[in-house]
Image (spheres, rainbow, N blue to C red):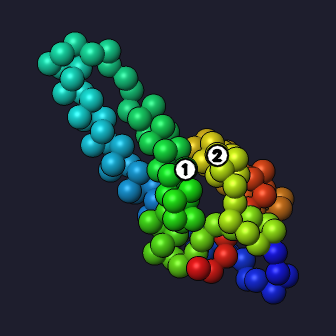
Amino acid sequence: MNPTTPTIGEGNRILHFLIDTILIFFLSFLIYKWYNFYVYFWAFKPIRYGYFFFAFTWVYTFLFELLFLRTPGKMFTGTKVMSTSGKRPNILQFFIRATIRATLVSMFGLAWNDQPLHDTFSKTVLVKA
């Protein structure tokens, strides 16, 4: 990656995190309610909402970043995901990003290396689109 390429600070990260989390919450809640229709009328096994939320977080992050290099929150803030080499990340990097982002410990990396853990382990960075 070009050393002069500006990376994204915490303010943009917080904003697109909030936007994405709100979208994920509402969409996963709709899917949860749709599934509960089948629980009520067809005797499907009930599943807690948290499972829907974290599964949808993974799918949302993986598909949006794989297809567009950005989620709707990143589209709003004008950022995109790139590998540290400055190229498009490969599918394994998207898989690692989505898996770590769907956990609760993703942001703890900011404390010691100025990057969330999903950026550190997938060897990706956020840059201006």
> Residue 108: percent from the left, percent from the top?
72, 52
At x 41% / y 35%, what residue is drawn? 52
At x 58% / y 75%, what residue is drawn? 79
Relative to residue 121, is residue 39 drawn left or right? left
Quadrant of the frame with the N terminus = bottom right
Q: Quadrant of residue 81?
A: bottom right
At x 51% / y 59%, what residue is drawn? 67
Q: Secondary structure at mark 1?
A: helix
Q: Secondary structure at mark 2?
A: helix
Is 26 rendered above or below residue 11?
above
Circles 2 and 1: CB atoms closer than 8 Å: yes
Q: Which residue has dot 2 on it?
A: 95
> Residue 49: percent from the left, percent from the top?
38, 32
Query: Which residue reaches farthest left?
Result: 41
**Total marks placed:** 2
Residue nearest the observer in this picture, 87 or 74: 87
Relative to residue 40, is residue 59 drawn left or right? right
Q: Which residue has dot 1 on it?
A: 62
Is 43 rendered above or below residue 100?
above
Relative to residue 108, is residue 44 drawn left or right? left
Q: Amino acid at mark 2?
A: Phe
> Residue 20: percent from the left, percent from the top?
46, 59
At x 45% / y 31%, what residue is drawn? 51
Relative to residue 112, is residue 64 drawn left or right? left
> Residue 47: percent from the left, percent from the top?
37, 23
Q: Amino acid at mark 1?
A: Phe
Q: CA distance from mark 2 to mark 1?
A: 6 Å
Is 4 rendered above or below residue 7?
below
Sequence-first disc among 2 and 1 = 1
Residue 108 visible (yes or no): no
Residue nearest the observer in this picture, 76 or 67: 67
Quadrant of the frame with the C terminus = bottom right
